[in-house]
Image (tube, grey):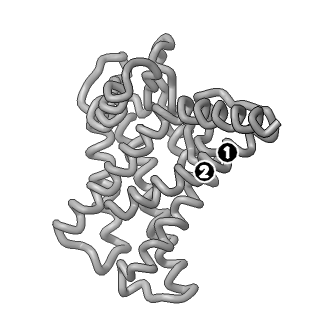
């Protein structure tokens, strides 16, 4: 779990530098609720908390899951996780070399694909819950951090009422259970708990990124502009 969180953090830092440099050179900015964070991490289901609440239809929930699952950022993230798993020989039965990487990549992408559909479409539809992340955008850093982390455990129902996020927990638990079909080396209870914790940790990190990325991007852009002015 810790390795994947560190990988995601490294991707965030590198992506921030790249996107900030691009924005500084082009002078262009994006909407805070754009479809991608850092230019490639899927951000289709972020919504500002202050907007008038409108529930999603069944087709809209499946559309969100599909946009996340088949986004270029998801393919890239799967490759990153696959590379890390192969380097640590996490599943010996997968082997090494190109053939081994294909197996690692397929399993890593399968984790993300199944997780997206379980938590954003299937269980939100069955349980009548909203899969979106509602960005707070105001308040102290710690209050927003706690809010972003808490959205793993709390969400809105289709009626707009706050309730426990069964879709996130049960959805990811189901995805972990399904993954036992292709993780032959890791099928015991401790492995399942570890996988669930990893997925919840990654989703929590993604929520924090979605909450603070617009602020960080503005901060980075301001620093770069000041540096550019000083050079002139």
Q: Quadrant of the N terminus?
A: bottom left
> In x, y percent, where is residue 118?
39, 47
Give SS at disc 1: helix
Residue 108, placed above or below residue 51: below
Question: Of the numbered discs in the image, which one, if any, rests on residue 9?
Answer: none
Judged from this view, the residue extending furthest toward the left is 189
> Is residue 174 or residue 156 the one in the foreground?
156
Quadrant that contains the C terminus: top right
Dividing the picture into quarters, in which one does residue 26 lie? top right
Q: Residue at x 55, y 39 (%)?
A: 43
Q: Are marks 1 and 2 in contact (CB under 8 Å)?
A: yes
- Between 127 and 135, the residue placed more toward the observer is 135
Let me know if residue 77 appears in the view. yes
Q: Going 49% across and 78% down the picture, which residue do you hit?
A: 103
Answer whether residue 59 is visible to the viewer in this image: no
Q: How far apart are the two marked residues, 1 and 2, measured between alpha carbons?
A: 6 Å
Q: Count neighbours of disc 2 (C-alpha within 10 A) and say few if under 14, some if 14 to 19, many if 20 or more.
A: some
Instruction: Please give the count of numbered marks on the rendered protein.
Output: 2
| Rendering coords of residue 55 (x, y %) | 45, 20
Q: Is residue 84 shown above or below 32?
A: below
Identify the residue under disc 1.
19
Find numbered disc 2 in the image and state the secondary structure of the residue it sits on: helix
Image location of residue 175, percent across then percent down: 34, 56
Would you call the spot at circle 1 few (<14 residues within 10 Å), some (14-19), or many (20 or more)?
Answer: some
- Seen in the image, is 7 located left or right of residue 164? right
Residue depicted at x 54% and y 35%: 216
Residue 96: x %, y % from top left:
48, 88
Specify whether 177 is left or right of 141. left
Q: Residue at x 65, y 45 (%)?
A: 39
- Tell me the number on the disc at residue 15: 2
């Amino acid at each position: 779990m810790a390795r994947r969180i560190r990988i995601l953090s490294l991707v965030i830092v590198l992506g921030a530098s790249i996107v900030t440099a691009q924005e500084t050179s082009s002078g262009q900015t994006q909407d805070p609720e754009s479809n991608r964070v850092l230019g490639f991490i899927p951000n289709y289901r972020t919504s500002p908390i202050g907007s008038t609440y409108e529930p999603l239809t069944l087709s809209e929930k499946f559309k969100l899951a599909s946009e996340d699952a088949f986004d270029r950022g998801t393919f890239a993230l799967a490759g990153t996780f696959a590379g890390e798993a192969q380097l640590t020989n996490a599943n010996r039965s997968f082997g090494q070399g190109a053939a081994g990487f294909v197996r690692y990549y397929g399993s890593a992408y399968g984790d993300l694909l199944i997780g997206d559909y379980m938590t954003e479409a299937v269980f939100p539809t069955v349980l009548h819950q909203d899969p979106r992340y509602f960005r707070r955008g105001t308040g102290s850093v710690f209050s927003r951090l706690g809010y972003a982390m808490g959205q793993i455990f709390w969400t809105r129902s289709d009626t707009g009422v706050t309730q426990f996020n069964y879709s996130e927990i049960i959805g990811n638990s189901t995805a972990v259970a399904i993954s036992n079909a292709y993780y032959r080396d890791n099928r015991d209870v401790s492995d399942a708990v570890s996988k669930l914790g990893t997925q919840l940790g990654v989703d929590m990190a993604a929520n924090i990124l979605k909450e603070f990325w617009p602020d960080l991007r503005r901060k980075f852009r301001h620093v770069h502009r000041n540096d550019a002015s000083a050079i002139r």
